[in-house]
Amino acid sequence: MKIIILAGGGGTRLFPLSRTCLPKQFLKLGEEQSLLAQTVKRFMPLVKPSDMVVVTNQAYYHHVQAELAACGASGAHILLEPVARNTAPAIALAARFCLDELGAPSDEVLFITPSDHIIHPVDQFIRNVRQAAELAKQDKIVTFGIKPDKPETGYGYIQAGQPFGAGYQVACFREKPDKDTAEAYLAAGNYYWNSGMFAFTVGCMLEELRVHQPEIYQIASAVFPEVINNFAAMPSISIDYAVAEKSTRVVTVPMTAYWNDIGSWDAIYDVLEKDSSGNAIKGDCLPVDCVNTLMLGRNRLIAGIGLEDVLVVETDDVIVVAKRGESQKVKDVVNELKSRGRREADEHTTMYRPWGSYTVLGQGPGYKMKKIMVTPGHRLSLQMHYHRSEHWIVISGTAKVTVGDKEIMVHENESVFVPQSTKHRLENPGKIPLEIIEVQNGSYLEEDDIVRFEDVYGRV
């Protein structure tokens, strides 16, 4: 069995924590490891890391690489989509990768999973996966159905038909319903939430693509390098629309483990521990006479007074306040920010890079201040800027600095000046994180004023 983990999405439903630069799958949400790392670890009792394929895009490559290392799965494969094309093309690309690059036979089972769900306990989930794999070997496309416990309008539904093995034949798929329809599904008893997880053999999926999506199949039937080259020509369509809703081979297995796709702040509230008043509190928060409220702070004190059924989420540049039950509309906020060209729609003030991170502390006409953290043993590219100079002050650790043809060591409470249009590099040769304050001065201070000459991360 091969595990295909889809980790290319840039979801906005958990804005302001989740943004294009750091989407949901890389968030830790109160846990020690990210949602992606938790997903990878769930499958370790079942397969080796070398039997896992994480499908993502170039922008998230180093994020994925770091998360795999953090959870002891560096041997997993990272498959980069050339462009975003939704789940059906991503799955077709992964299937061809498994056939041509990993030597998988056509009857090998692929288990497809998103990278950003919460599922426990793991042993119960693994039993469900094995049940799905056995049905997949019978040339079936297997979905995981989640027994609904409320009339949820944010999920698609699966209508179960006649029993089949450990599951049921799928009568039909239903779109996200309105409240009355969701209540009818709940009362009927044979409807399940669509979890977005699938199991099938490589050959079965390629055959179903041939029948239902010939445009995708034609490209996916070539050898892997050609599939990569022509990937952008595939239509952008989900696996549900492309195959699952059309195929007669689909069965669903009711998942007995707990599942939550963390698709909204309401879902976050549901999974967090509550106090005696029903409040879910994370961070530096002070609730006074608050009931059934989520308060999630990162950098500042949040004081709530008399709040009931309210969601408050704070970052250093955005605060979102919403009524519980309305958090699906946060995507409307993001769309409005995008339409206004606001940076907050896509970027945090802290941006992560292969070598560490930087945080914008302040900026104005002609200047910008950053706090830069370089992880031990890492270094930035050898670069220069046409429009700005930089002052670096070391506040923790030791920096190895190249300026022009000079190389110097800069220690805590020491500084160095980098003139405009001068080649330079910052490195951390030590054993602890290097932290510096960078003050930029110049007529243009954006990130695209970087000319790279050497880079160990392949960005030249």
Image: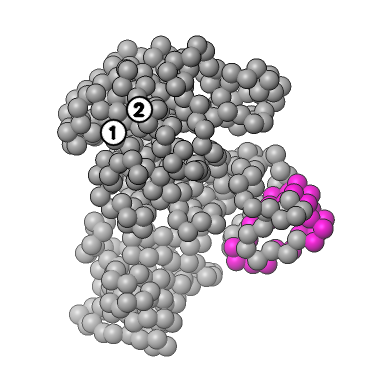
| Residue pictured at 26% horizontal, 21% vertical | 203
Q: Is residue 438 magenta?
A: no
User: Relative to 323, does residue 297 appear above or below in the rendering?
Assistant: below
**Label 2 secondary element:** helix
Q: Which residue is mark 1?
A: 1
Instruction: Looking at the picture, tell me which residue is in the foreground, 406 or 247.
Output: 247
Q: CA distance from mark 1 to mark 2?
A: 8 Å
Instruction: Looking at the picture, tell me which residue is in the foreground, 269 or 213.
Output: 269
| Residue pictured at 24% horizontal, 56% vertical | 458
User: Relative to 362, does residue 181 appear above or below in the rendering?
Assistant: above
Q: Is residue 318 left or right of residue 45?
A: right
Q: Amino acid at mark 1?
A: Met
User: Relative to 353, does residue 83 appear above or below in the rendering?
Assistant: above
Residue 323 lies in what quarter of the image?
A: top right
**Snapshot colouring:** one colour
Residue 427 lies in what quarter of the image?
A: bottom left
Picture coordinates of residue 394 (x, y %)? 40, 82
Q: Tell me where the magenta segment starts and ends, as one range.
A: 288-311
Question: Could one spot residue 297 in this view of the protein?
Answer: yes
Q: Amino acid at mark 2?
A: Ala
| Residue pictured at 41% horizontal, 11% vertical | 248
Q: Which residue is mark 2?
A: 133
Instruction: Characterize the local packing of mark 2: few (<14), some (14-19) or many (20 or more) Cα atoms within 10 angstroms.
Output: many
Picture coordinates of residue 271 (x, y %)? 60, 46
Q: Is residue 12 left or right of residue 8?
A: right
Instruction: Looking at the picture, tell me which residue is in the foreground, 349 or 364.
Output: 349
Q: Which mark is residue 303?
A: none
